[in-house]
Structure formats: structure tokens, C-alpha cells
Amino acid sequence: MSITANAYLGGPRPAPDELLPSAVPVRFVTEAGTASDVPSGYAAPSDDRLGEAYRRMVVARRFDQQASALTRQGRLAVYPSSRGQEACQVAGVLALRQQDWLFPTYRDTAAVVARGVDPVDVLTLVRGDWHCGYDPMATRVAPLCTPLATQLLHAVGMADALRRKGEDGVVMALVGDGGTSEGDFHEALNFAAVFGAPVVFLIQNNQYAISVPLSEQTAAPALAYKGVGYGVRSEQVDGNDLVAVLAVLDEAVEHARSGRGPFLVEAHTYRLDGHTNADDPSRYRAEEEVRRWAAADPLPRLEAWLRAREALTDRDIGAARAEAEALAADLRARIELDGPPNVLEMFDHVYADPTPQLKEQRRSLEAEAEGTEA
């Protein structure tokens, strides 16, 4: 163990009640777009930031709809929709500065678009290519990660490296509720707490790990409590209330940036569509449940809140929708300009001198692609 780590471990330990999340999810705005009557204890973001969040959410929603349509047309191999989770993904990006890092899962394409990555590049992986499509070092966005929770260890490693180099960066590590049952999730929390890594774990609890409901996955009172056992300050928030999510994440990022170690946030949300285009969610969830969550949609909720505060006009809404339509049209026009991915490239960057097995696999795939036997 390094001297730096020993110094961190030798510091004052937080009292257990300083780590506990709120008894109920933090909320600023009700489903109707009115003010919650329960004090949150967090500072509300400015109306200017909320207006920017609204614009990005409109763009994110349209991007998601367009990507789903491209999948139905056979132009994407697969697409995991995030419709309904825009408040979590946009707030997760708005809480960061340029020098910070984002570690997304496969469902967090809206977050990566909100971070400023070209939407065409964001969809590279789900087109079936072998690479992520963008430069992680230039964008400070790690590749979209399909294996559950493995990116959390990478995120903590990055955060620890930033800390050791004396850089002022924070890492936002996204994970779903299913990922919290993986061993990597627990190893990441323990390492981050022991070494004081400046990382924020944002759990998007959309209620289902594919088709497994949360009630059959964990006995914890809430996923946020999983951070406490590792010495990580934790909080839970209404994930469809962007005002609340951004308020909590602002404090979480400041906590990590100021050298007080990691922070875990559980955002209670819901994916309105299936797990992917290959999923039929009607087989495992009731229509009434979907209707209830649709009524809590984060986008009209924020729109109603901002309109009531006279912080959003018809012109603002029209401009955001026009920008979103332009993005969708550009996406349709450019998505296939480079032609279909060359599947044989997946063998090119594994070993300088490929193994006999890889050479055989390449010959077999090449023959299959050409319609002949190897």
C-alpha cells in the first residue's frame, strides 16, 4: 500500500450517520411540475442551468427515438433505449467540468451525446463495429461498456490516477441496478473508499435488470445503502426529477473534487421501452405500471416547472425541438456513409502475431462472409 493511501486511511473516519442516504428519495419537483413540500437540504441549480438541461433532454429524447427507428430499419445491430432516463443522464453530464471523465454503460448513449460526442460516433458500437467510434482521451468519455459493472473498476482506477497526479478531475461512473449485484461493483466501491478516489457512482435504478425486478435482485432497503458498508457517503434521489438529480450530483461532485473521497447516488427512474429492441417488456411488467411511470416522465415535468417560473418560453421550446430534429436528420444522413463495418478488422488488433486459433477463426469468418466453407 502506498504512503498516499496510508495517509488517507489515517485520516478521520466519518460517523455512520454522515454516510446514510435520505430516508426517502430527494425531490424538488412533483410529477405535476409543482414544488415538492419536503425540504431537500440541497441547493437548487439556477434556472439558466435548468434551461440548458431542458434543451439537452429534448435532444437526447429525439436522439433515442431516431436510434430506435434506425434499429427497426436494420441499420443498427441492436439498441438499448434510455427513454425515460434522460434526467439522470443529462444531469450526470451537466455536473461535470471539462477536465472530468465520464464512464458510461451501453444504455448511456444520451449521456455521451450530451457530453458533446458526435451522435454518429456514439452509435458505432451498436452498428456492430469493434471499436467505440470516438477518442476517449480527447473526449474524456470512456467507451460504452456492455459487460455489467466492469467499467466501474476502470473508473476508479482513472480517478485514483487523477488524484495521484495532483489533477483536479472527477470521474462520473454510471451503472444500472443490475450492475450493483456484480462483484466488480463492490470491489470498485471498496477500492475507491480505501484510496479516497474522486469518483461519483451514479446508479440508474430503472427497476429491472433486463426482466428481473428489483425486488427479486436485492433485499437492501435501497441500493444507496450499499455504499455505507464501504465508508462511502450515499444518497438517493427521484431520478425523474432533473432539478433534484442535478442538485444532488453537484454536491456529490464537489465532495469528490474537494478530496473527501467517493460518493454514491441512487436515482430511482424507469426505462419506458424494452431492455433492447429484441425485448418484449409486456412479458414481465404490467401496463398499469408503465402508465404510472409515464406520468412521471422527466421531460414534461421539467418543462412545466420552468414554464411556471417563466424561465422557459414557447420560443425556447421551439428552438430545442428544431435542434433535435436537425440532429435526427443529420444522423439519418450520415449513419452509413462509411459503409458497413468490416468484421474482419476485429482480428487485426489482438496480437502482433495472431495465434493459430485466431487465424483459423478469421479464415472461417471470411469464408462465411463470402458464402463459402473454410
Image: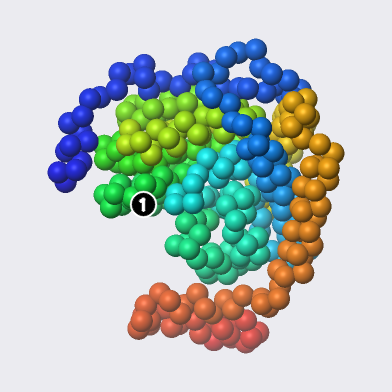
| Local secondary structure at mark 1 | helix
**Dot 1 amino acid type:** Met
Of 243 and 333, the residue lying toward us: 243
Identify the residue at horizontal 69%, vertical 38% (top origin).
Answer: 51
Residue 248, position as x, y percentages in the image: 52, 29
Residue 316, position as x, y percentages in the image: 79, 42
Along the horizontal axis of the image, is 34 left or right of 251? Answer: right
- Give the labeled residue for mark 1: 158
Q: How many marks?
A: 1
Residue 171, position as x, y percentages in the image: 42, 46
Quarter the C terminus occupies: bottom right
Along the horizontal axis of the image, is 26 left or right of 167? Answer: right
Identify the residue at horizontal 50%, vertical 74% (top origin).
Answer: 346
Along the horizontal axis of the image, is 339 left or right of 97? Answer: right
As drawn, the residue found furthest toward the top would be 37
Crowd class of label 1 (few under 14; some 14 to 19; many from 20; radius 10 Å): many
Question: Looking at the picture, does residue 168 appear above or below residue 236?
Answer: below
Question: Looking at the picture, does residue 286 appear above or below residue 324?
Answer: above
Quarter the N terminus occupies: top left
Residue 215 visible (yes or no) = no
Q: How is the image coloured?
A: rainbow
Of 164 and 87, the residue lying toward us: 164
Question: Looking at the picture, does residue 297 appear above or below residue 112?
Answer: above
Residue 133 visible (yes or no) = yes
Identify the residue at horizontal 28%, vertical 52% (top origin).
Answer: 165
Identify the residue at horizontal 56%, vertical 42% (top origin).
Answer: 94
Residue 148, position as x, y percentages in the image: 48, 48
